[in-house]
Every structure is written in structure tokens, then in C-alpha cells.
Image (cartoon, grey):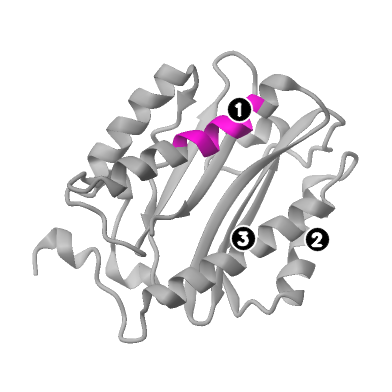
Amino acid sequence: MTAESSKEAVGQHYSVHAMQYAQQMTWRVIEAIAAQIKPGLRESDAQVIAKQVLAELGMQRIWHPVLIRFGANTLKTFKQRSNGDPQLGANDIFFIDLGVVFGGHEGDAGATFTTGSDSEMQACAAAAKTLFDRVRVHWRTGGVSGQQLYDYAQAQAIEMGWVLNLDIKGHRVSDFPHAIYRGGDLGDFAETPGRGLWILEIQLAHPTRPFGAFYEDLLV
């Protein structure tokens, strides 16, 4: 086994079907949380909502902290703390990032939502999903390394008029816990990423205004 192929190691209970189920359930959680987030709430209020929804939908555990970012905090990376506890405005933007275990497998998904009618915020949220879709199609053509995927994402983001945060470059998932395999970032993976093993992350910033957007999903 090469050093790169060892980054795609999985446990004896792993299955692509189980990964897809975990991912579907994670998206259900995100949609349920987003439906309850309204202007006037604070990030801390959204965290309470998230915990309630996760319990209602029967998650086994979380495997990374629940991230819900409002406004300018949408520019923060996973490892950065939010600034304060902002209140969601009537014309605002927010994203949800969940890492949840269902059926012994790791779901990980994230999406951006808007309130009101700020057209640039709406365009930013849509662009994160559009760029994700373009990169996923590029992956599906075959023969593209993880490094090449993010080179392509960077070029596409520039063409679309957005700033891609290359500190966020995707990561491994599998049957829990994936961390024992030391898979590293998708954007550093020198081989073609396998199906049902990697999360493609896209984080964009508006070129002049203080907000961004995030989208991630399983490459499958």
C-alpha cells in the first residue's frame, strides 16, 4: 500500500451505502435547522435549535462541532471562533456545517442560506453551490487528483468573480472514526479521490463586502 492509498483506508464495517445514508440524514438535519433560523436569532440560539433537531432525528453522536455562522462570521474557517454572538438581520446570510454519525458512519454537509432580499448575498450563497457542482463534475470525469480539483476550483472561482478560501480544502470521512487513517486534506491528495471517502468543501468570500458562503458534500 502506498502512502497515498493508505489515506483511503477504511474500517471493516465501512460501506458506500452506509455513507450515503449518513449523508442523507445529515442533510435532513441541516434542512430542519435552517427552517427554524429566523431574523432576530443569535448564533447561540441556532446552536440550541441544532441540538434539539439532532436529538429528534436520532443521531448517534457528533464527530465535529456544530458550526452555524451569521453575517461576517461566514468568512471564518472551521478552526476560527466566531466574533461575538451576532444577531441575524432581516437581510443577512448564514451557513450551517454539520459532522454527524448515523449508522456508524460519518455524515458531513454544509450549506449557506439568506434572509431577505440582498441580491449579492443570494448570489454568493448560490455561487458556493454552483462551484461545488462544477468541481464535482470535474472529479467525475476521472483521472483528476485532489490537488488538481482545487486548482480547478480556484480558476473557476476567479472566473465567477469570487474569492476562494484555499485554507479550506476538503477532508476524509468513513466509518467512525476516520481520523485514525490520517487522510489529510482532499486538496493535498495526489491521487484520484475514491467514491464515498472524501468531502469536497467550498468556501467563498465576496470580493469587497464582509461576508462569504460555504458548501460541502460527499463525493459519491
Tell me: residue 47, above or below residue 169. Answer: below
The amino acid type of the residue labelled 2 equals: Ile
Q: Report if residue 78 is visible in the image.
A: no
Q: Is residue 162 magenta?
A: no
Residue at left 46%, top 34%?
Answer: 131
From mark 3 to mark 1, how far is it between C-alphas? 20 Å
Q: Report if residue 61 is visible in the image.
A: yes
Q: Secondary structure at mark 1?
A: helix
Classify mark 3: residues with Cα within 10 Å, few (<14), some (14-19) or many (20+): some
Mark found first going from the N terminus, 3 or 1? 3
Image quadrant in which the C terminus is located = bottom left
Residue at left 37%, top 78%?
Answer: 15
- Contact (Cβ within 8 Å) of mark 3 with mark 1: no
Query: Which residue matches tag 3?
Result: 27
Depth check, mark 2 against mark 3: the one in front is 3
Q: Is residue 127 magenta?
A: yes
Query: Which residue matches tag 1?
Result: 124
The amino acid type of the residue labelled 1 equals: Cys
Q: Quadrant of residue 59?
A: bottom right
Q: What is the span of residues highlighted in magenta in the rendered image? A: 123-131
Query: Which residue matches tag 2?
Result: 49
From mark 2 to mark 3, how far is it between C-alphas? 15 Å
In front of the other: 207 or 138: 138
